[in-house]
């Protein structure tokens, strides 16, 4: 008996391609910038949507652009958003959401009976959507030709209403402007996210007409066509907050507040104390270790990575800062693009500008500004100083009022201060200059040449004392004022 190859039927899930619509101007934003490029919690609106796609196992994505297409492409590049198989379709004239999807079709992998596939359609202006909700939508779509998300709103105005028949089955979606008075009272609305079987999508789109108040081709007509052709439909209910569409800046502020609440609760659940969560602003990509504590008014922007057991006190604004465990950032410190070691103490009122590195255990105090400067382990600059383009070793003491004169009006120059140096108060270091290991620079010195290791260096005008001259001087000064 010969072995015949056995053909096993697999119930593999169909491939999923995504179309994201972002061609509209978003006139209600009243902005020079298109709507989907406005940002929430540190990310452009559109990026919030695009970031969901990889976790859904999407095979390819078509982004439909129109207004400011180049600006959107630039944003994707700047933000390093590289989606698998990302293609662009241009919808030159915005003739409605169905027209936009039609523009995307040529960019999709071709569908055939042998290789079933589904298309996930999202709008670029619903940034609060979650992966979990889309997974529910995909699951629902496994047993029907069209699955869509809906929500219930106490004020549904502006949204498309889901009209159900006497049997309770969804029949059609009617846009706000096309509603009868009775339909306008329907609170179940279309959220604007769909999973559609590819062949039905292509077929139904060819039938969509612009027979509505706006003379636009509405994607929402898919439902009507599915019902007419006996295609199975699933409507998945979602919490209103997750599917909120942004149309103007009031919506934007509400969405951002909701996102902030979600982000802050996430951090608190992972063991971070937020003294005043309604007044703490943390961008989406920020990470914070457990037992860290944030005071009121703290703003953490961009890609901050905060270690465990850190304290970031009132009013600090950190942008792209990497902070090791146990750091203490005292009130009103501003820092960006900097790396701060374990157990550092920074602030109050410190200003750390880009490319600052503060090693473990170092202290930076009030009114100290650092730029492109490396501060070695255990070193201190506790009051009123400017340290720019400097390399400072370990266990160095920088006295109050020290200034690196790093700029000659044309170029920037480096100051190097080796380990265990003591820089007295009110010292100017005219760069390029090096202070050798263990040297002491006396208060009030202007350092213009390299200081040898171990040297005591001072450059001062000699002090002159005139005995009893004070009273004589005072008398003369008073007399000149007529006293
Ligand atoms: C749409 C839905 C509505 C739903 C609501 C949810 C339609 C007809 N209506 O209405 O049922 O309740 O979303 O938020 O789909 N776009 C294009 N090209 C176009 C038109 C729109 O790319 O020609 C893009 C827009 O840039 C935007 C998205 O599609 O990202 C939605 O467009 P928008 O005009 O905001 O639709 P709504 O009127 O909100
Ligand atoms: Mg909208």
Image: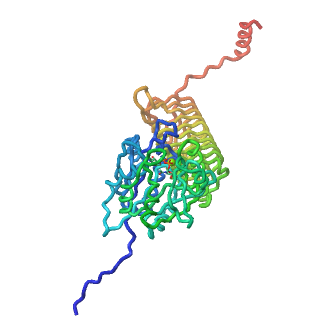
Q: Is residue 134 above or below residue 63?
A: below
Residue 278, above or below 199 = above
Give left or right: position of 100 versus 293.
left
| Residue drawn at 46 percent across, 63 percent down | 227
Task: State whether residue 226 appears in this view.
Answer: yes
* Residue at x-position 44% and y-position 63%: 228
Q: How is the image coloured?
A: rainbow
Q: Is residue 314 above or below residue 241?
A: above
Please name the residue shown 48% across and 67% down the image.
Answer: 140
User: From this viewpoint, which residue is outermost toward the bottom?
Assistant: 1
For the C terminus, the quadrant is top right
Residue 131 image offset from top left, x and y in percent: 49, 61
The image quadrant that residue 121 belongs to is bottom left
Q: In the image, residue 436 lies at what x, y percent?
A: 46, 39
Q: Nearer the viewer, residue 446 or 163?
A: 163
Given residues 69 and 263, the one toward you in this image is 69
Q: Residue furthest right?
A: 483
- Quadrant where the image shows the N terminus: bottom left
In this rendering, the count of numbered labels is 0
Question: Is residue 454 in sight in this rendering?
Answer: no
Q: Is residue 270 left or right of residue 44?
A: right
Q: Position of residue 255 (x, y in %)?
A: 57, 49
* In-front residue for pair 379/312: 312
Q: Position of residue 379 (x, y in %)?
A: 55, 45
Extreme left residue here?
2
């Amino acid at each position: 008996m010969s072995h015949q190859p056995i053909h096993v039927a697999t119930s593999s899930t169909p491939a999923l391609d995504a179309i994201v619509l972002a061609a509209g101007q978003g006139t209600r934003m009243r902005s020079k910038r298109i709507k989907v490029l406005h940002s929430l919690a540190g990310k452009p609106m559109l990026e919030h949507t695009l970031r969901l796609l990889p976790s859904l196992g999407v095979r390819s994505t078509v982004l439909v652009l129109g207004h400011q297409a180049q600006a959107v492409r630039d944003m994707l590049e700047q933000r390093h958003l590289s989606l698998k198989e990302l293609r662009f379709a241009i919808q030159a004239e915005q003739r409605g959401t169905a027209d936009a999807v039609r523009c995307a079709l040529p960019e999709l992998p071709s569908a055939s009976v042998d290789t079933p596939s589904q298309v996930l359609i999202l709008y670029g202006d619903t940034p609060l959507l979650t992966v979990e909700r889309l997974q529910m939508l995909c699951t629902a779509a496994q047993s029907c030709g069209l699955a869509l998300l809906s929500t219930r709103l106490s004020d549904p105005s502006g949204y498309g209403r889901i009209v159900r028949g006497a049997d309770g089955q969804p029949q059609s979606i009617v846009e706000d402007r096309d509603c009868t008075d009775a339909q306008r009272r329907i609170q179940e609305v279309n959220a604007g996210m769909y999973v559609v079987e590819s062949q039905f999508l292509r077929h139904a789109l060819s039938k969509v007409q612009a027979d509505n108040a706006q003379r636009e081709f509405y994607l929402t007509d898919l439902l009507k066509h599915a019902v007419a052709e006996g295609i199975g439909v699933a409507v998945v209910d979602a919490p209103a907050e997750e599917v909120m569409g942004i149309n103007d800046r009031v919506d934007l502020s509400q969405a951002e507040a909701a996102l902030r609440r979600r982000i802050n609760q996430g951090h608190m659940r992972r063991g971070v104390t937020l003294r005043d969560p309604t007044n703490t602003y943390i961008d989406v990509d920020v990470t914070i270790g457990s037992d860290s504590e944030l005071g009121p008014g703290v703003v953490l922007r961009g890609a901050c990575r905060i270690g465990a057991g850190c304290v970031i006190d009132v009013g600090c604004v950190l942008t792209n800062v990497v902070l090791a465990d146990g750091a203490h950032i005292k009130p009103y410190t501003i820092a960006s693009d900097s790396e701060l070691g374990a157990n550092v103490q920074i602030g109050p009122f410190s200003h750390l500008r880009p490319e600052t590195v503060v090693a473990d255990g170092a202290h930076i105090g009030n009114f100290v500004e650092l730029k492109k400067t490396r501060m070695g382990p255990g070193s201190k600059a506790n009051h009123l100083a400017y340290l720019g383009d400097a390399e400072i070793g370990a266990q160095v003491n920088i006295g109050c009022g020290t200034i690196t004169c790093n700029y000659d009006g044309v170029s920037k120059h480096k100051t190097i201060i080796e380990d265990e140096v003591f820089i007295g108060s009110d010292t100017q270091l005219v760069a390029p200059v090096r202070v050798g290991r263990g040297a002491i620079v006396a208060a009030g010195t202007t350092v213009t040449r390299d200081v040898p290791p171990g040297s005591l260096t001072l450059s001062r005008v000699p002090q002159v004392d005139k005995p009893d001259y004070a009273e004589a001087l005072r008398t003369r000064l008073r007399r000149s004022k007529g006293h």
